[in-house]
Image: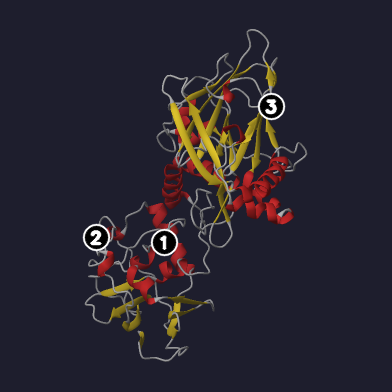
């Protein structure tokens, strides 16, 4: 059965309901937006349309995923709402869903999202049409439901656009791109995974990364203490990110440190390499040695985003200033083997168009002179002082203090968590030795999503990763 309408229908006019149908492979392999689990566009424009009465099966040739991932996608498709009927609104095409909610999709949005072979290359998924070839105000000539899919024919165009219900549902305005993570407080146990679990299975890597995305910090326990262990662990995610400190760096107190961390002084809360255009997303700190006679040296953490939400609630004016005025972050160091001169300007708080916090920047030891108008200076420094006090408050509920044990690795989000260190005294012949490295935002996000295809539980939605994504 098909439900149809043409472009001359009046606003709000509803059409015949489409009865639910059995699930086809086309429904299973639907495209999804980037921060969701299923991100595939499996509709093939040249394939015969499936009506509600067409017998369907999931043949092996239809699958692009592992059997575990396919079973998950099928269960998702079976439980998701379907499109009941179509109509029009002032803004575009109106979809009424079986769970009672409505979606409106603008004609231009639908036209530009078309995945027919005239619009997108099948294998690469990249657009074929030049931007100037796309009409500014495309008009729908005919729209109907076919086998649960929305099918559109366009005026003056000779191609058909087909959209799966699952994909439309997940791209409508009401669907969140990502779930919000759960901040850790001093009353919470820091999540842990065993080194052997991460090294032994892909499901172990998924559990590790999902915990890290959810909470921002995970301890990997019971690992070796040898140099290079952190690389071995990190490469379960992706290749190590190379920075101005190389691929691996050692946090050991020295007489002439090229970084303040390579000494025994206390470190205020900060993010690493925030003077990069794209700072690392993840940081790994593996404890190789930490002699018991060393006093101090605990690694400290705070959920920066949780602190910012408190700032917004208690000091909204300070929050507004720090989300608008850019600070300067820099690493200018010529007295080293390979001189460095990096300067980058960005606000301390990053917001999307809905006002949600999607990231931020905090690194007091690497701040340069802010290039701000004199009229903003007083408000900026007052707001800065408020936030700094919150981040260095020893009684804050967000403060976590961990004395790493040899063999443990702190794996944490460098975009969400700020970290520091208490000062330490090091008696002769003792040592506190950590080895660390970084992972890019792109590598972490991609690895989490691809693992989720096979290992995520039903209903899983990726946590917001604080990598600057707009939503």
- Nearest-to-viewer mark from 1 and 2: 2
Whole-percent x, y for residue 204 in the image: 50, 40
Q: Local crowd at mark 1 within 10 Å, few (<14), some, or many (≥20)?
A: some
Instruction: State if disc 3 and disc 1 touch (CB < 8 Å).
Output: no
| Lower sequence index among marks 1 and 2 | 1
**In this view of the protein, which residue sits in the foreground, 186 or 399?**
399
Question: In the image, which disc is placed on residue 32?
Answer: 1
- Nearest-to-viewer mark from 1 and 3: 3
**In this view of the protein, which residue sits in the foreground, 89 or 19?**
89
The colour scheme applied to this rendered structure is secondary structure
Residue lying at 67% horizontally and 14% vertically, measured from the top left: 426
391 to 292, vertically: above or below = below
Whole-percent x, y for residue 7 in the image: 35, 87
User: Which residue matches tag 2?
Assistant: 121
Instruction: State if disc 2 and disc 3 touch (CB < 8 Å).
Output: no
Query: Which residue sits furthest top?
Result: 428
User: Which residue matches tag 3?
Assistant: 422
Query: Which residue sits furthest front?
Result: 374
């Amino acid at each position: 059965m098909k439900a149809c309408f043409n472009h001359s229908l009046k606003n709000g006019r509803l059409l015949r309901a489409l009865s639910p149908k059995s699930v086809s492979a086309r429904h299973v392999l639907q495209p999804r937006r980037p921060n969701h689990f299923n991100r595939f566009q499996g509709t093939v424009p040249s394939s015969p349309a499936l009506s509600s009465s067409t017998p369907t099966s999931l043949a092996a040739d239809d699958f692009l995923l592992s059997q575990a991932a396919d079973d998950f996608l099928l269960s998702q498709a079976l439980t998701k709402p379907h499109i009941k009927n179509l109509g029009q609104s002032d803004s575009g095409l109106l979809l009424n869903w079986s769970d009672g909610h409505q979606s409106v999709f603008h004609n231009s949005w639908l036209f530009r999202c078309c995945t027919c072979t005239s619009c997108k290359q099948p294998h690469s998924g990249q657009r074929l049409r030049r931007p100037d070839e796309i009409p500014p105000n495309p008009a729908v000539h005919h729209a109907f439901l076919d086998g649960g899919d929305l099918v559109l024919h366009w005026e003056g165009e000779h191609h058909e656009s087909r959209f799966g219900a699952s994909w439309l549902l997940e791209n409508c305005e009401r669907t969140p791109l990502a779930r919000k993570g759960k901040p850790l407080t001093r009353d919470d146990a820091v999540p842990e995974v065993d080194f052997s679990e991460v090294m032994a299975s892909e499901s172990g890597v998924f559990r590790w990364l999902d915990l890290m995305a959810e909470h921002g910090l995970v301890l990997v326990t019971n690992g070796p203490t040898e140099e290079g262990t952190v690389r071995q662990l990190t490469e379960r995610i992706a290749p190590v990110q190379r920075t101005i400190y190389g691929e691996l760096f050692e946090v050991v107190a020295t007489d002439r440190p090229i970084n303040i961390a390579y000494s025994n002084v206390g470190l205020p809360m900060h993010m690493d390499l925030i003077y990069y255009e794209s700072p690392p997303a993840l940081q790994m700190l593996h404890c190789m040695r930490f002699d018991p006679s060393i006093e101090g040296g605990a690694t400290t953490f705070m959920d920066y985003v949780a602190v910012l939400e408190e700032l917004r609630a208690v000091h909204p004016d300070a929050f507004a200033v720090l989300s608008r005025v850019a600070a300067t972050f820099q690493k200018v160091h010529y007295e080293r083997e390979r001189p460095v001169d990096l300067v980058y300007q960005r606000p301390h708080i990053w917001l999307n168009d809905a006002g949600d916090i999607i990231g931020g920047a905090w690194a007091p030891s690497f701040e340069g002179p802010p290039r701000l108008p004199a009229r903003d200076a007083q408000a900026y420094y007052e707001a800065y002082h408020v936030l700094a006090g919150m981040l260095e408050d020893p009684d804050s509920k967000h403060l976590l203090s961990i004395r790493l044990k040899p063999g443990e690795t702190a794996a944490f989000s460098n975009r969400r968590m700020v970290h520091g260190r208490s000062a330490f005294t090091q008696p002769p012949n003792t040592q506190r030795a950590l080895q660390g490295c970084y992972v890019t935002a792109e590598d972490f996000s991609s690895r989490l999503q691809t693992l989720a295809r096979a290992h995520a539980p039903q209903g899983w939605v990726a946590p917001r990763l604080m990598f600057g994504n707009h939503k």
